[in-house]
């Protein structure tokens, strides 16, 4: 996905960004091509632990620094919450970019409805096949 046609003012995407890889880069580059100003949220270590039941390998401050160094990232924030309505209140974006592997899930169907009521679009970015942090972790453990 290069450009979706409509150029948004403020875009938002977030993730763990542990063991930063080309899939993360593809998401950020695609998001930036479709908005003037891109905010990237990095999930805090505690938030990751809450929903993945493990801590990231790279600490949150270092992950935020890596993400902030990526061309096209206008602002990086460390998030203590995952609720998109709370994040909307903080950052006032008009579009959220998320991997298409989340499309159709109960969580994101709900977010689409809630965000749509606030005139915020949800854009699903194609998942980069053949790469994931989970796969990288497995490869390292198998060495």
Image (tube, helix red, strand yellow):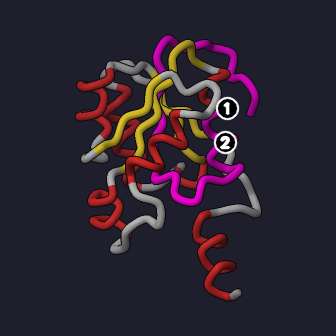
Give the residue number, with chain letter if any, for mark 2. Answer: 25
Near mark 2 (Cα within 10 A), the count class, few <14, some 14-19 or many ≥20, is: some
Q: Residue at x 40, y 57 (%)?
A: 59
> In the image, residue 123 lies at what x, y percent?
56, 33
- Range of magenta residues: 1-30
Give the residue number, with chain letter if any, for mark 1. Answer: 29
Is residue 92 or residue 133 the one in the foreground?
133
Q: CA distance from mark 2 to mark 1?
A: 6 Å
Under circle 1, the secondary element is: helix
On whether residue 107 falls in the magenta region, the answer is no
Near mark 1 (Cα within 10 A), the count class, few <14, some 14-19 or many ≥20, is: some
> Which residue lies most toward the bottom here?
142
Q: Is residue 5 left or right of residue 11?
A: right
Residue 139 in the image: above or below residue 57: below
Under circle 2, the secondary element is: helix
Q: Is residue 76 left or right of residue 136?
A: left
> In the image, residue 51 lies at what x, y percent?
33, 65
Q: Are marks 2 and 1 in contact (CB under 8 Å)?
A: yes
Q: Residue at x 27, y 60 (%)?
A: 46
Which quadrant, please, contains the N terminus? top right
Which quadrant holds residue 39?
top left
Which quadrant holds residue 94?
top left
Label at residue 78 = none
């Amino acid at each position: 996905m290069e450009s979706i046609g409509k150029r948004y003012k403020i875009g938002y995407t977030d993730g763990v960004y542990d063991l930063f890889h080309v899939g993360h880069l593809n998401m950020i580059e695609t998001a930036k091509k479709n908005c003037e100003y891109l905010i990237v949220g990095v999930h805090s270590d505690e938030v990751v632990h809450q929903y993945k039941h493990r801590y990231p390998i790279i600490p949150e401050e270092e992950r935020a620094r890596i993400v902030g160094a990526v061309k096209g990232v206008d602002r990086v924030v460390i998030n203590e919450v995952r609720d998109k309505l709370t994040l909307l209140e903080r950052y006032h974006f008009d579009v959220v970019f998320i991997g298409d592997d989340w499309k159709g899930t109960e969580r994101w169907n709900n977010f689409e409805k809630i965000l749509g009521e606030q005139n915020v679009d949800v854009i699903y970015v194609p998942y980069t096949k053949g790469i994931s942090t989970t796969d990288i972790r497995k490869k390292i453990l198998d060495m």
